[in-house]
Amino acid sequence: MKKKLLGIFIVVLNWNTVKSQCEQYPVLNLGNDTILCHGTSITYIVPGGYDSHNWNIGAGNQPSVTITSPTTLILNVANSTPNLVVNGDFEAGDNGFTTGYTYGNSPAIGGILWNEGTYAITTNPHIVHNNFSNCSDVGTSPPGNMMVVNGSNTPNTTVWSQTITIDPNTNYSFSAWVTSVQNINLSDVAILQFFINGIQIGPIFSPTLLACDWQQFSQTWNSGANTSATISIIAQVSSGNNDFALDNITFNTICPQSDTVVISFDPSQINAGPNLTFCENESDTIQATANFPNPNFTWNTGQAGPVVIPATSGSYIVSAVSPTGCNLKDTVLVNIKAMPWNFDTVAAVPTSCGTNNGVVYTLVSGTFIGQPQYTWSGPGPNSPNQINASVWQNLGAGWYYITLTNNGCTRKDSVLVTPLNSPVAEVSANPDTGYGPLSVNLTNSSSNGVTYDWFFGNGNTAIVNDLSSQNQVYDSVGTYLVTLVVINGNCTDTATVLITVIPPPIPPVTVPVGLEVPNIFTPNGDHVNDVFTFELLNIKELDVTIVNRWGNPVYTSNSIPFGWDGKDASGNLVADGVYFYKYTAKGQQDEPFEGQGFVQLVK
C-alpha cells in the first residue's frame, strides 16, 4: 500500500514538474471574437515566445494571416522543453551514447571510414571518406559536428543508443535528422528503425537518395509507467552502400497551446431601392430600407430620412451607421427623361344645339423622338371613343381629353366643346322657407329655352312653353327640391331651388316656478316635510342659490329635481331661521324664468 501511495506521489510530482515547465511560456491569446465591416480585413500575427506554430487556414506556418471573409481562426503553438538527449548534436564529440559500430581507424588512403560498420564524429563526411560528399550539419553556424556512418553488412545493428531518465505519464517528442552522404540508388539507401525501450516507434525511415538532403524523423511517445527511456536507432542492411549521417537527436516534452477567434461580418445592410426611370412631368420616390431597426439615413444630396423625391438624374447614395458602428452605403440610379415638347394650343369649335358639328384640335411644338402619338377621348372622362390624330371633328357638346405621348412620356390636356345658343336655366322661389301651408311663387328667369319642364318636389310637375311663373303650396313640414329643366332641341340645362317648411312654433308653457314653493320645512328626520323643494313643470335647466340672512351662501344646486335637506356644503345641519333663495330656469323651449323668496327652517 505504501508503494502505491509513493507511486501516486511521484506521478503527481512529475506532472507538476511538467506543468510548471509549460507555465513558463506566455499564454496564447489572439483576442476577442471580432465583427468586421464588409470590405474590411483584419491581420493576426503570431505572438513571440513560441517554438512552432500553425494556422488552421491559408498561411499554415506563416508568421501572420489576413482575414477577408467570415471564418473561425485557430492558431496552434508549441514550446519544447530542454533536450534530454546528452550530446544529441555531437558537438561534444564521441560522448554520451553507445553504438554497435566501431569508431573508424582505417589507415587506408580513402579515409578513416573506409571499412564498413564504422562511424566517426566530424564536421564533413568527405573528411572521413573521400567518396562521401561535402555536407554541413543541421542548423549550426559555423558548421558543427555530425555522426557519419559507413553502413554495416550486419542487420539490426544499433547505430546510436542512450538511456534517459523520464517522467511517467508524459508525452515526449522524439526527433532525429538523417541524410545520405553520397548520391545513391534506391537499393543502396539506409533503412533505419527507431526504438524506445525495445518497442519500435513510427515507421521504417530512409533518407532521400540525394547527398546532404537532411530529412527529419519525428514521433510523439507517451511514457506510461516508465521512468527511463532507452532510445535506439537500428540500421538494417540494404547493400554495402547504406551510408548516412545523423544529427540533432532530441527528446523532450512539448507544451502545446491553442486559441480560437471567430471573425464574422456585420450582417447589417441598407438598400436604396431599385433604379428609377420616369418622365420629367411626373414624380417618383426613392425609399431606403434596412435590415435593422431605427436606421438614420442620410443622402449625398444632403437630405435625411428614408424617402427622397429626386429632382435630377444621377446617382443617389444613401448612408447609415449599423448598430455595430459600420458605415453602410448603397446607390440607386435615377434617370429623369427630358420632355422638350409641349402643347401650344388645345382648342375647340362649338357645336350647334341639336347637331354634332363641333371640332377639337391641338398644335404642339418641341423636339420629338420619332412621331408623337395623339389620343383623344370624350365626351366625358369615361367615354370609350378615341381617335389618334391632332384634329377630331363632328363632335357633340362636352369635355374632350387629349393625351400626347412620345418616348414613353405623356402630357395631357382637355377642352370643352360648347353648344351655340345653349339654354341657361335659372329659377328662384319666394318665399323659400316658412310654416305650412306654405304658398311659394317660382320665377323662371332662364334664357334660350323653348320648352320648360318643372318638377316641384311635392309630386306635381308641369311642362310649359313660356317663362310664366308657377305657384305651389307645400303643406307638410320638410324639404322640397324644385327642379327646372330648360330644353332647346338636343340641348338642356337644369336649375334647382330648395323649399323648406318648418314646424309651427310651440305655444309657451306656463311653469309655476315659485308659485308652489313652500315657505317652511322641518329637516328633523321624521320623513315629513324634511326637504325644501320646488314643484317643477316643463323645466329643463335650474340653478338655485340659498343664503342666510347675512347674505352668505349656504347651499347651491343645479339638479333637477331640486331639494335641500337643510345642510351646508360641509354636510352640517344649519341653524333654525329664515333663509332666502334665488333661482334661474329654462323651459323646454328655452323660455327663461327667474325668481326669489324665503323659507323658514324649523328643526
Image: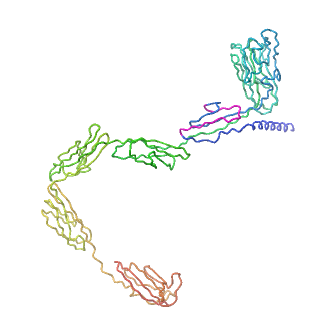
Q: Is there any visible trace of residue 603 in the rendered image? A: no
- Main secondary structure of the magenta stretch: loop
Rendered image quadrant of residue 491: bottom left
Q: Is there any visible trace of residue 27 in the rendered image? A: yes
What colour scheme does the image use? Answer: rainbow
Is 51 inside the magenta-drawn segment?
Answer: yes
* Position of residue 98 measured from the top left corner of the image (x, y, whole percent): 82, 21
Rendered image quadrant of residue 101: top right
Query: Front-most of 326 and 256?
Result: 326
Query: Front-most of 537 and 357?
Result: 357
Q: Which residues are magenta?
A: 38-58
Left or right: 65, with 464 as reference point: right
Query: Front-most of 577 and 364?
Result: 364
Q: Quadrant of the N terminus?
A: top right
Left or right: 563, with 23 as reference point: left
Q: How many marks?
A: 0
Q: Residue furthest top?
A: 109
Is 320 inside the magenta-drawn segment?
Answer: no
Residue drawn at x 62%, y 31% as measured from the top left: 59
* Position of residue 423 measured from the top left corner of the image (x, y, whole percent): 16, 58
Rendered image quadrant of residue 178: top right
Vertical placement of 403 versus 588: above or below? above
* Position of residue 595 measured from the top left corner of the image (x, y, whole percent): 39, 85
* Position of residue 148 measured from the top left corner of the image (x, y, whole percent): 77, 17
Left or right: 284, with 293 as reference point: left
Left or right: 493, with 555 as reference point: left
Q: Residue furthest front?
A: 142
